[in-house]
Image: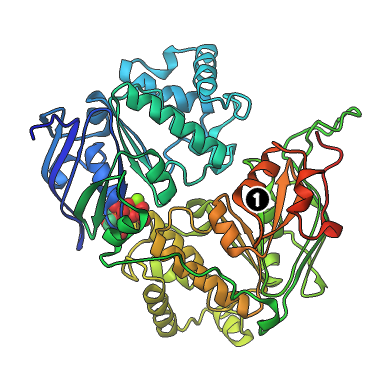
Amino acid sequence: MTEALALELVAIEKSFGGVHALRGADLGARPGEILGLCGENGAGKSTILKVLSGVHPATSYKGTVRVRGREQRFMTTRDAEHAGIAIVHQELMLVPELSVGANLVLGRENKGGSLLGNIDDDAIEATARKLLAKFGVEGDIDPLVPVGTLGIGLQQVVEIVRALSQDAKILILDEPTAALTGKETDRLMEWLRGLREGGTTCIYVSHRMDEIFTICDRITVLRDGKTVGTVPAKPTSPDEVVSMMVGHAVGGKGVRATALEGARAEAQHELVVNELTVRLPGIAIESGGDDRVRTDAVHEISLTVRPGEVVAVCGAMGSGRTALLSTLFGCAEHGFTGSVRVSGKEVVLRSPRDAIAAGIALIPEDRKGRGLVLGMSVSDNLTLPPPKSRVARTLEWLGIVDEEEEELLAARRIKELRIRGAANAEVATLSGGNQQKVVIGKWLEDPPAVLLLDEPTRGVDVGAREEIYGLLAELGNKGTAILLASSDLPEVLRLAHRILVLRHGRIVAELDGRTSGEEDIVKIATGATDVVKTEVTAITNSASTRLEQAWQ
Ligand SMILES: Nc1ncnc2c1ncn2[C@@H]1O[C@H](COP(=O)(O)OP(=O)(O)OP(=O)(O)O)[C@@H](O)[C@H]1O
Ligand SMILES: [Mg+2]
């Protein structure tokens, strides 16, 4: 049984102040193997991978790291890179102000030791184009634009392309597909299979069990900073892995969120959007009669979300999901036309403040940038939105905040959502999934009239996901109108009463959430099928269905 391991971590212990993130964790992977790494939020997955990739220097933890049999004591990420280790971090690590090209080439350049300044822009652009083409995204990503101007999904693609282009012997992917849609995920899987054939070792972290079981050879499970075990993917079932993660048996599928019935709603909030058009930033509007030239991020969208209803918007990357949601939250930088009514009243949406005043809440896609104040504590983040009662608002205006009450509220939320992290801990130090729970938790006290959710469970573990679904059902029963953008199709099918499919900023179909399948959505969203004929059977309410005419 002396099989050569490509990498081995033995008895790793790592603390952050009083938090024991790793308490004797082990991990081993063979050459040409894809090892899945699973565990609940806060189990220590990212931490152990940061040990392996030199983010946490060798002096900061206990235990042994071996790469191809040799003990290694990495002090920096550069050391790990030299040993042939590349990592796609869970949180994006790109330099937003630099171009896509510079971000892509930066990583490769470090290896040669030359300075960025020595390479001219044309060379950077050419290399970047080649790399993007290898991933088949050269048409979607312009190497010259600052990477920070891309949507989160495309930024993640850039990050993946950068790691893949390093020709590493060991490739670590920490939730690489969280922001990807099906197409990009499939491409990544294809690429990983190719690398495996070439002998590369991959470590793959994901909360999506379908992905883990599609791509991984073996699966290691962490719980509370310790390794529970490693199992071969083949005869093992997802339920068995989840049981290992949570430490007790689980079975069956969770109930569908059918609790979200408008009829039972306590309040009657409704969102009505009429002919909403949002301009794309920085694009001259000169279509010259060719209506294929895209000038709108969102084009003449009309939709209604009834009290207690969950309406999902699905579509490929860049289809307008995020633009739609952020406009409804008052964040349309370039203005919009059309009207929005909440509970019958027309609302002005010039800023998030307007949106909040109208009873609209947003759980954004980009939790790090917009969802949280990273330097503040968990408890302050949880109690951040303005309290609704006029008395409370006046008191707050006067600078009088009932701290005791806020503390109690925060403590309750931390318990309810099982947030792993102390109330006074800085949010930035929480694991990714726990940060997301804080983002959602902060809106629950005063249920909003309209709740907009953009990829709400990205990076959230299976257990917490159920808790969040339960909370959404609760909000639905209270009469909140819920508009959900998600690329997690099982999630969409489970939560949504109705599904609107977006393509190029237009609604091309409306499907029944209960009778449709993943394939129906994908086919329409990607334009693989002509909406007009075949899909009509899957479309429930053809009268309200808007078929795409001008496009394609
Ligand atoms: N820099 C840090 N400072 C303080 N605590 C930290 C830091 N990094 C991680 N932790 C803590 O260590 C524990 C493990 O976190 P880690 O990020 O490894 O979890 P994870 O398994 O990757 O979870 P997720 O699925 O949510 O990404 C958590 O309790 C987290 O709050
Ligand atoms: Mg993590």
Going by the numbered disc 1, the residue's amino acid type is Cys
Residue sitting nearer the eye, 456 or 246: 246
Q: Horizontal and vertical percent for residue 163? A: 39, 29
Q: Quadrant of the C terminus?
A: top right
Q: Quadrant of the N terminus?
A: top left
Q: Horizontal and vertical percent for residue 200? A: 30, 26
- Work out which residue is located at the far left of the displayed protein and give it: 2
Residue sitting nearer the eye, 528 or 119: 528
Give the residue displayed 53% in from the left and 51% down from the top.
366
Q: Horizontal and vertical percent for residue 364? A: 57, 56
Give the residue displayed 63% in from the left and 25% down from the top.
139
Residue 405, above or below 530:
below
Q: Report which residue position mark 1 lands on.
A: 314
Q: Quadrant of residue 153?
A: top right
Total numbered labels placed on residues in the image? 1
Give the residue displayed 59% in from the left and 64% down from the top.
495
Left or right, 466 with respect to 309, comes to left
Residue 96 seen from this side: no
